[in-house]
Image (tube, rainbow, N blue to C red):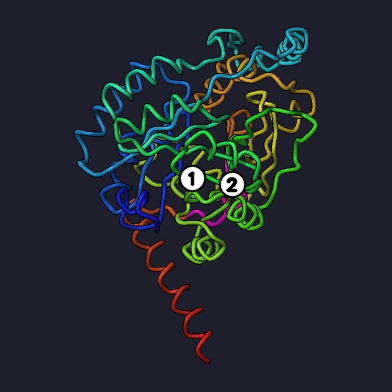
Amino acid sequence: MSSVLTDLCRYPVVQAPMAGGASCPQLVAAVAEAGGLGFLAAGYKTADGMYNEIKQLRGLTGQPFGVNLFMPQPGLADPSAVEVYRHQLAGEAAWYETPLGDPDSSGGDDGYEAKLAILLEDPVPAVSFTFGCPTRDTLDAFAGVGTCTVVTVTTPEEAQAAQWAGADAVCVQGIEAGGHQSTHRDDPQTDGTGIGLLSLVSQVRETVHVPIIATGGLMRGSQIAAVLAAGAEAAQLGTAFLVCPESGANLLHKQALTNPLFVRTALTRAFSGRPARGLVNRFMREHGPYAPAAYPQVHYLTAGLRTAAAKAGDAQGMALWAGQGHRMARELPAGRLIGLLAEELDAARAAVSTGSTQ
């Protein structure tokens, strides 16, 4: 690993920031204590909520960790399209006996400026960004307080923009990844056209010189070895950590990852208005084709429905975010999973080394 990452973790394994509760302080602490780099997800939280989780995490570990921020989104959503989708979801509201949410409740900025202020006043070791690239002034400010910055990218062009802005590293996200695709521009015309991880890492490696963290469908140490061979310095895993006992993910979500009832994943706008990969369920099938490109409006519109479905024990109405490797999930404590991934990585490297000498 490059020095910017070796200072943060013993193994080249990063636990992805999964907004919605999975990336809780307990999970991040367990990953950090085992030698990986864990990330808290500040998305959908208030600035105070983020600060309280950081404080809790610091009480659990003295090891480095990161915090992930959502970039503010431009107000490009068509209000009439959101209203049409609201009417389509009326049956869901009646079924779950809960009102639809206010699509404009957040204003679209996710408390970004307030979170920046906290993280610059009381710095953490690493900060990553999703859904866009911060300004050079912002990245320079973090450099000034000693924070390593990572920008999530989905194309070589986005990686180049992140390097120009001054990011310390890029997190290269392949189309296989669970959860939201972190495109810098939400263009419905490009839905489903993302690049596979190995190809994308190789392309980005030839485009920028900053360190690369690879993410998307990774579940085994042998896969980590593959992305490292392709040019990454570390691998980021999300779905692999969802089933850990320390994860804050809903139990129904954890169980669904290996439930034979859910046989595949797909990208959908049904739950949030932005393309995100999850297990195909009833809600996705019925509403995905009609969901507008309207993030975060659709996210807040459906938030109550998703909560009600979880309370009712109905996984068919939940957003079951999952990467393409979800069936390979192992229900292990996070620390044990980090150790096992490291062992598998060593074994894969040894096999390649042995093969190359024969």
Q: Secondary structure at mark 2?
A: loop
Q: Amino acid at mark 1?
A: Gly
x and y percentages locating residue 87 in the rendered image: 75, 10
x and y percentages locating residue 30 in the rendered image: 29, 46
Residue at 30 percent across and 35 percent down: it is: 146
Q: Is residue 150 above or below residue 78?
A: below
The residue stretch that appears in magenta: 320-329
Q: Is residue 46 above or below residue 122?
A: above
- In the rendered image, which quarter contains the N terminus? bottom left
Q: Is residue 189 left or right of residue 128?
A: right
Q: Secondary structure at mark 1?
A: loop
x and y percentages locating residue 294 in the rendered image: 69, 19
Q: Is residue 321 magenta?
A: yes
Q: How many residues crowd mark 2 within 10 Å: few (<14), some (14–19), many (20+)?
A: many
Q: Is residue 326 above or below residue 73?
A: below
Decide whether the magenta segment is chiefly helix, strand or loop: loop
Q: Is residue 22 left or right of residue 191?
A: left
Q: Which residue is mark 2?
A: 323
Residue at 77 percent across and 29 percent down: it is: 188
Q: Which residue is mark 1?
A: 238
Residue at 65 percent across and 18 percent down: it is: 298
Q: Amino acid at mark 2?
A: Gly
Q: Is residue 86 magenta?
A: no
Q: How many residues crowd mark 1 within 10 Å: few (<14), some (14–19), many (20+)?
A: many
The front one of 256 and 293 is 293
- Dots 1 and 2: beta carbons under 8 Å? yes
The front one of 352 and 299 is 352
Q: Which of marks 2 and 1 precedes in the sequence?
A: 1
Q: Which mark is residue 264?
A: none
Q: CA distance from mark 1 to mark 2?
A: 8 Å
